[in-house]
Amino acid sequence: MNWLLKRIKGDPVIWGVVIVLSIFGLLAVYSSTGSLAFKQKGGNTEFYLFKHLLFILIGLGLMWLAHLLDYRYYSRISQLLLYISIPLLIYTLFFGVEINNAARWMAIPGTGLTFQTSDLAKLALIMYVARFLSKRQDTIHIASSAFYPLLMAISIVCVLIAPANLSTALVIFSTCLLLMFLGRIPLKFILAVVGSGVVFFILAATLVLKMPDDSIKSVARLATWKARIENFMGGEENVGGNYQSMQAKIAIANGGLLGKGPGNSVQKNFLPESFSDFIFAIILEEYGLWGGILLIGLYLTLLYRSIRIVIRSPKAFGALLAVGLSFSLVIQALINMAVAVNIFPVTGLALPLISMGGTSTLFTSVAIGIILSVSRNIEPDGDESEEEPVLEKGGNHVIA
């Protein structure tokens, strides 16, 4: 044990948050997979518990390995991963494994496992954007040398992800815009992209809602998007189509302030995807409002500690890397929670380190490991001999 403790570096608070979130996830997955176990595993309720535990342990191992590697190596790794991600996204778009009417997964030959190529692409793109911005500070205000090439790379990845996983594409795009702002891309360029995007989505949503069902059934996931928007906007009048949200509301109402206790959820037997997309509703039912506040506090603590790393980091790449990865994880968590309480339409985003998942848990662990690597290498005994632009604070931007 002492050998292990001596080799665990990085922000101890982030390590603590990860451990608590992992325990939360184990309890929630064990409770919410009871019905699934009876349907698919003949009542073996421990199967999914041990499966989730295995991925958590592997994830912690990957996190440990990722945090041992000096974060500056991820600058080069990001290029390689991005070059690998784009062909994988194209393959998944046309030949991906379809689960729940979405071809987001790619089969891993010889293992029987699948993984979402968008998870790899998200990690690669955020690292690449951090690298690009830190290397182009001398010409950051020139659109042709900084803004346009970066926007093209971001757009290619997001466009390839969007047909099967629009919510993930939007999270990635939003995170990259944030990094562009912090990396001193002129605000007028960013506002132009945001304004164009808002107009495009308003027009697209209006067009999709007006199209008859028969004409969009064969067009990717337009029918699913239309149904989700209509269900969300239908409110209480659309009880049948809004089944998931209604069951989630019942679970939240049953939980009250203190909850019904671990394992005592009733709505887990009625709520589809109670172990993944809507696991936060089950947590609120079993642990109550205070349990939900604790969970939100853990994610915000992760974000806060990552921001402290940004403030302390003397290197542009490390600061942008830490803030980009942490924001993507926390934004995903907050969107998942917002869906559970019916603030957002159903998106299909998992709750990081909580929802039952396989490779998604592993990629999340690697992302946190990279954040820990940045924190590890800005400690007093860290080696910061490599010459890179030094971070300063200027206006609303992080200046490298």
Image: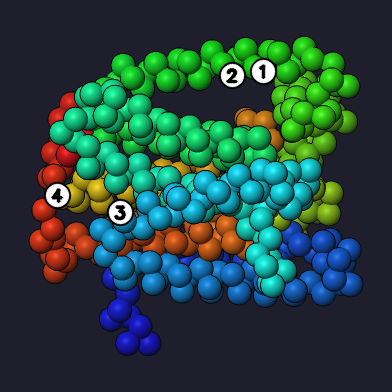
Residue pointed to by mark 2:
201
Whether tag 1 and tag 3 are in contact, CB under 8 A, the answer is: no
The reply, left or right, for residue 62 in relation to residue 310 is right
Crowding near the residue tagged with mark 3, few <14, some 14–19, many ≥20 C-alpha atoms within 10 Å: many
Coordinates of residue 202 in the picture (x, y in percent) = 60, 14
Label 4, label 2: how many angstroms apart (C-alpha)?
39 Å
Specify whether residue 248 is in view: yes
Q: Which residue is mark 3?
A: 75
Residue 88, label in figure: none
- Say whether marks 1 and 2 touch (CB < 8 Å): yes
Disc 2 residue crowd, few under 14, some 14–19, many 20+, Cα 10 Å: few
Task: Say if 312 sits above or below 42 in the image.
Answer: above
In this rendering, the answer to whether 227 lies above or below 267 is above
Q: Position of residue 309 (x, y in %)?
A: 26, 52
Q: Which tag, 1 or 3, sits closer to the chain's start?
A: 3
* Residue 251 in view: no
**Residue at image x 17%, y 39%?**
400
Nearer the observer: mark 2 or 3; the answer is: 3
Query: If the image is split into quadrants, where does the N terminus sit?
Result: bottom left
Looking at the image, is mark 1 or mark 4 earlier in the sequence? 1
Mark 4 nearby-residue class (10 Å; few <14, some 14–19, many ≥20): some
Q: How far apart, in angstroms, are the residues tagged by discs 1 and 3?
A: 38 Å
Q: Residue at x 35, y 27 (%)?
A: 148
Tell me the CA gap for discs 4 and 3. 12 Å
Which of the two labelled residues, at mark 2 and mark 3, occupies the earlier sequence position? 3
Residue at label 4?
Answer: 388
Q: Which residue is mark 1?
A: 205
Q: Position of residue 120 (x, y in %)?
A: 51, 53
Q: Residue at x 51, y 59 (%)?
A: 363
- Amino acid at the residue labelled 2: Phe
1 or 4: mark nearer the eye? 4
